[in-house]
Amino acid sequence: MPRPGFVLEVDRSTPSIMFWRGENFSLEKLPAGRSRVIYPPEPLEAIKDIDGAIRHALLNPHDQDPLPTQLFPGMKLTIAFDDVSLPLPKMRRPDTRQRVIEAVLDLAAAAGVDDVHLIAALGLHRRMHEYELRHALGDRVYDSFHPRGMLYQHDAEDHDNLAIIGTTDHGEVLEINKRAAESDLIIYVNINSVSMDGGWKSITTGLASYRCLSHHHNPETLENTRSLMGHRHQSALHTSVWRMGKVLKDHGPKIFQIETTLNTDMFPAPFDFLSKREWEWTARDRATFLATTKSLNRTPIKLARKIFHNMEGPHQMTSVQAGDTDAVHKITLEKVYEQQLVDVVGQTDILTMGIPYVCPYNPDGVMNPILVMCMGLGYLFNMYRNKPLVREGGVIIMTHPCYRDFNPVHHPSYIDFFEQVLADTTSPAEMSRKWEKQYAEDEWYKHLYRTGNAYHGVHPFYAWYWGAHGLQHAGKVIIVGGDPATVRRLGFTPASTMDDAFEIASDVVGRDATITHLHAPALLVADVQ
Amino acid sequence: MKRSAPTRLSSVGPLRRAAKVGDAAGAAVQALLKPTKALGFPYRKPSVPKGMIVPPNVSKLGANFETGWARSTPAKAARRMVTNGPMHAFVRAIASPEIVGLDRLADLERMKETPAVIFAPNHHSHVDTPLMITAVPEPWRSNLVIAAAADYFFDKRVKGTLAALTLNAFPIDREVTSRKSSDELRHLVDDGWSLVIFPEGGRSPDGWGQDFKGGAAYLSNRTGAPVIPVFIDGTGSIFGKGMKRPKAGKSKVVFGAPLLPIEDESTRRFNARIEAAVTALGDEALTDYWTARQRAAKGTSPKLTGPEYNGWRRQWALAEHRKLGKAGQRRRQNRRWPDLG
């Protein structure tokens, strides 16, 4: 029986706590008497017969007819699926998407459906490499569909292949992939790692155009998104997305949503100690930690990155549900919370967090400084329900080397964003006004996005906006162990050690400030009362 | 005349002498045997009482070949060395296998106690056995028993011993349904040994497949062990039945999803399902997954047993069929550029 998450009050007997530091870790001693650590729940038991559960979900959907009755010869069927940004780290083969899509294809074959297209729902993310598609879908599906041109990746800049479905009562235009729009049925295959994902967000962002995305991916909406991972009514982003979902439901093609949840068994042996509570580390775990950190200190960064990105998580499916998007997503959220929710009483003055080597926007790539900000203020800061873990005006302390390093293939516009935009302003509203259009419409970035493996030119803006609420909420952001010049360019304060960071933070929150550490891995959502 | 008479007499003399020597030797042997004769049973064969029938001697070859020792720890260690060393190198050199579909076994692998399974591949060549042994992933590879034809592999003591040691072969009778063989195989599965059973019963005589026999389905029904359908492509051209020596080529091993008997499913029906699964995998190996699924759904998957007609047209169709698979892919030849001076 997995143990639930809990809050540890740090006293003098508490051992040092593990923090991520990019492609390495460190142990930090938190001040006794005023610190607490939030530990995530242990991984839930995975479904035993996963393929059986998928088949059951397809045959017994929520608020819709069984999938076989919706399939018929001569129909246009489009299967869209989440891209490489999920799950993290990538899961051991077979990936959930492969399992679900093979089960769907079995039913489609039995129903005599010939016209089947598979589309990677990228939104403005980078195109997946062949090995990533093979990993997500399996060689069988890839070899069957890709050579025939029936497996491809969504292109948000291919205006000939985009179609407008309608406009919301707020004037938001819903424009999605034309093939999907003209299909008799869209089957969306989703992996819900965090509660922010899934529901109507899957199609209205994954298969949408830049024009469509810009309605909710903007500073104003994201500053008003007061709980990205929590209740939908507190999220301006989700409110906008759900409005578009209504347009899609009323005027778009029929949608059969398949959502899945994973447990948080994220790291394979010998790195499984990362998810353990420090006082439960065995002699072997301690030896592994020491050997790993010492050797990573001497490992070239490119090799260290390769080691980490090659890791495959043992996480497995904990639930699968299919049918009507709203009905399905409601159950999915319950399942995600069942795995990730931890009750926390009261806010804190200082929130600490270790930033890992990966975020949704750098699978198999470099965690550049903009992504460090996005991961810290956009994701980890937002891992709450009701109200933020840190009080308004509090301090956020992150640990990461924050090197000035970019992947020019994946993040070409990020390099210019760092050098040009951040040199000018770190204000989301101002950069949106002054710079966003130029980057979004840059022909070279569009070309790299459409033909290479680059994120869209506007993507660094979106990554920055993702942290807009955190940026607005926090009184100060400190990065421990980061390259000082790079950290200052981000508008944050560098610190050499955690003690230095607490000292710097005391200028803002006083000497007796309370500290809360968000322990990662694994994933957790703090239900702050 | 006077000259020939002494010659004849001189030639008779030695013969008589030889006869006398022979008689003396015979008498000496008789004299030696006389005491044993007198001693009787147990120094001599016992007499059979009237009305009694002596059962025939049971041969220790064939299906009765004792192979229990081959599953002892020292034999396992020796076999592991053979499997991971020379056998692996041999298979790579001669068959260059491409192994796909192992992800279908992932659910069994992640179970706390990995269950014993029954691998059911089609059979074209002697290469199939070492190919399967090297293609099957751990943890099954270390605990793999090959069901081998008793009349072929265990007809000589040396041959049987080698087969048991290197392949962990277990004799099964192809000609008669032997309860002893099936009971022992059942016990092996219960003890955690996985099996490779070629349901066709033997190598293909003409390059096309044969109808499946029910051994794998029967054992699965009795033991609850899942059956893993496997399709092997290309080995028929490497060392098919009738070939005098092997010819290096390419091969492909496609593992299918585990099959379990449905409640109240007869062995015959389950066997038909296993055959259909291997047939679909064969189609997948030669075309692609989606085409194979579509054809399987319509019931139009090309049969393993080939076309119905006989004669030259069947062989002609075989050549066309092989072109689609691994046998149609030639290994890269060392290109010889012309000497242009």
Image (spheres, coloured by chain):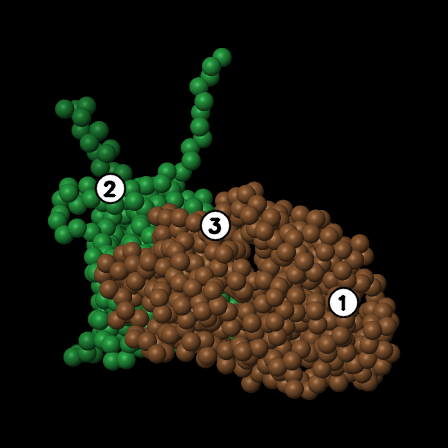
Camera-nearest label, 3 or 1: 3
Q: Looking at the image, do the residues carrying marks 3 and 1 touch, with CB atoms under 8 Å apart?
A: no
The residue located at (54%, 64%) in the rendering is A216
Co-location on one chain, circles 2 and 1: no
Sequence order check: which comes first, mark 3 or mark 1? 3
- Which hue is chain B drawn in? green
Q: Nearer the viewer, residue A130 or A388?
A: A388
Q: Nearer the viewer, residue B244 or A519?
A: A519
Residue placed under numbered mark 2 in the picture: B319
Instruction: Name the amino acid, label 1.
Output: Val
Which labelled disc corresponds to residue A477? Answer: 1
Answer left or right for B285 relative to A15.
Answer: left
On what subunit does the disc labeled 2 rest? Answer: B
Camera-nearest label, 2 or 1: 1
Instruction: Name the amino acid, label 3.
Output: Glu
Q: Position of residue B236 (x, y in %)?
A: 30, 47
Q: Residues within 10 Å of mark 1 (few under 14, many from 20)?
A: many
Which labelled disc corresponds to residue A157? Answer: 3
Answer left or right for B176 relative to A57.
Answer: left
Co-location on one chain, circles 2 and 3: no
Q: Looking at the image, do the residues carrying marks 2 and 1 touch, with CB atoms under 8 Å apart?
A: no
Q: Residues within 10 Å of mark 3 (few under 14, many from 20)?
A: many
Q: Nearer the viewer, residue A495 or B279?
A: A495
- Which hue is chain A drawn in? brown
Mark 3 secondary-structure assignment: loop
Q: Is residue B25 visible from the viewing direction of this image?
A: no
Q: Nearer the viewer, residue B184 or A394?
A: A394
Instruction: Name the amino acid, label 2.
Output: Ala
The CA distance from mark 2 to mark 3 is 48 Å
Answer left or right for A473 relative to B203.
Answer: right
